[in-house]
């Protein structure tokens, strides 16, 4: 009986799996998938939470404290509190342990704090200590209790609104001639203070990069052979090259800005032969994300699974296992 000779696949033919299974179907694999799904949401919440805490601590918090202080520490503020049904001289805010007047203490020993006569004498003693600026310690007022009541009627959102108004007013002020001169003087002073001048210029550069009115308008996102041939870097086309450089090289050169990771506001300005530039179909925001994350966040349409494909190629090119010799009988 003639044996049918099986046809071996040629070297060029490669068998690939129907579907790529990147994560094994195990408990650890499911945990990893869940972690990858959950982490972006958690990180987003953490970032906005930290931003809210920073704004509350350094912007709205101090403004609210200033509002509360202005209501608690002067006569005009007390008139406003009276309209809000808060009387700082009432027994509700009396720091009884802080009372050091012997006459009042003698009365309390025979009577109670709520006794009308004690209250009248207490008010007389306090009225003798009143001035335009209210000293809460001298008036035996509990700071924490009064602040709690004031914060209860003066909502913290007022600090947010005032912060916005302050920022708008500041922006309007620095837009004029006097405001610009003040900002320039302040900027020069900050550059002369030891220690501060080591941090302030970079902080200013960072803020101006993200919030400057005149943004850098990049024409195209490209890949350039930088810093050496065979190594490609993301760059932004900013315009034509310098005339002298172009005339000396005799080539059509363009000016590109190569951002640095992870701080894309710093980088290098280079002049590249236009023929050696590869245009990239990605936006400026996507290019900045790639730079800031060191290539971790890549647009989906530009993702390449090279390492996985190479592993599959190595598996497909492995020599076949030799078949066992057949029984001649």
Image: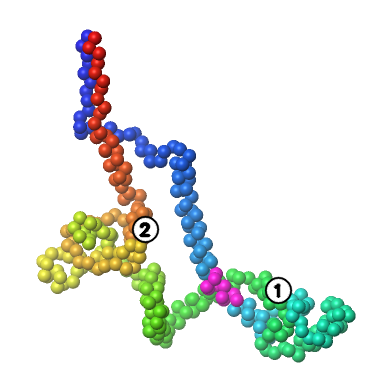
Looking at marks 1 and 2 on the same chain, the residue that comes earlier in the sequence is marked by 1
Which residue is painted at 76% across and 88% down in the image? 127
Of residues 74 and 211, which is closer to you in this image?
A: 74
Across and down, in percent, residue 17 comes to: 33, 34
**Within 10 Å of the Cα at label 2, are there few (<14), some (14-19), or many (20+) other Cα atoms?**
few
Of residues 174 and 126, which is closer to you in this image?
A: 126
The residue that mark 1 highlights is 145
Q: Which residues are magenta?
A: 56-65
**Within 10 Å of the Cα at label 1, are there few (<14), some (14-19), or many (20+) other Cα atoms?**
some
Total residue callouts:
2
The residue that mark 2 highlights is 293
Q: Quadrant of residue 240?
A: bottom left
- Residue 161 visible (yes or no): no
Which residue is painted at 77% across and 84% down in the image? 100
Of residues 156 and 165, which is closer to you in this image?
A: 156
Q: Real-space Cα distance between discs 1 and 2?
A: 48 Å
């Amino acid at each position: 009986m003639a044996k049918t000779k099986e046809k071996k696949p040629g070297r060029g033919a490669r068998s690939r799996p129907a579907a790529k299974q990147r994560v094994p179907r195990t408990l650890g694999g499911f945990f990893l998938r869940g972690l990858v799904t959950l982490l972006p949401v958690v990180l987003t919440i953490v970032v906005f939470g930290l931003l809210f805490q920073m704004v509350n601590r350094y912007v709205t918090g101090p403004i609210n404290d200033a509002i509360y202080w202005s209501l608690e520490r002067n006569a005009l503020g007390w008139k406003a509190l009276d309209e809000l049904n808060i009387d700082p001289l009432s027994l509700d805010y009396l720091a009884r342990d802080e009372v050091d007047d012997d006459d009042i203490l003698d009365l309390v020993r025979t009577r109670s704090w709520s006794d009308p006569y004690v209250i009248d004498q207490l008010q007389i003693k306090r009225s003798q200590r009143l001035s335009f600026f209210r000293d809460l310690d001298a008036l035996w007022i509990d700071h924490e209790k009064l602040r709690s009541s004031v914060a209860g009627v003066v909502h913290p959102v007022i600090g947010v609104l005032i912060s916005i108004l302050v920022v708008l007013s500041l922006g309007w002020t620095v837009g004029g001639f006097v405001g610009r001169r003040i900002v320039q003087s302040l900027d020069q002073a900050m550059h002369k203070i030891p220690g501060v001048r080591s941090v302030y210029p970079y902080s200013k550069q960072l803020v101006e990069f993200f919030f400057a009115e005149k943004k850098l308008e990049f024409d195209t996102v490209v890949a350039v052979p930088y810093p050496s041939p065979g190594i490609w870097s993301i760059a932004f086309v900013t315009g034509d090259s310098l005339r002298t450089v172009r005339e000396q090289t005799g080539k059509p050169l363009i000016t590109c800005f190569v951002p640095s990771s992870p701080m894309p506001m710093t980088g290098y300005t280079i002049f590249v032969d236009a023929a050696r530039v590869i245009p990239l179909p990605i936006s400026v925001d996507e290019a900045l994300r790639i730079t800031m994350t060191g290539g971790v966040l890549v647009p989906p349409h530009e993702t390449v699974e090279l390492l996985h494909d190479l592993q599959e190629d190595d598996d497909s090119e492995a020599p076949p296992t030799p078949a066992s010799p057949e029984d001649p009988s």
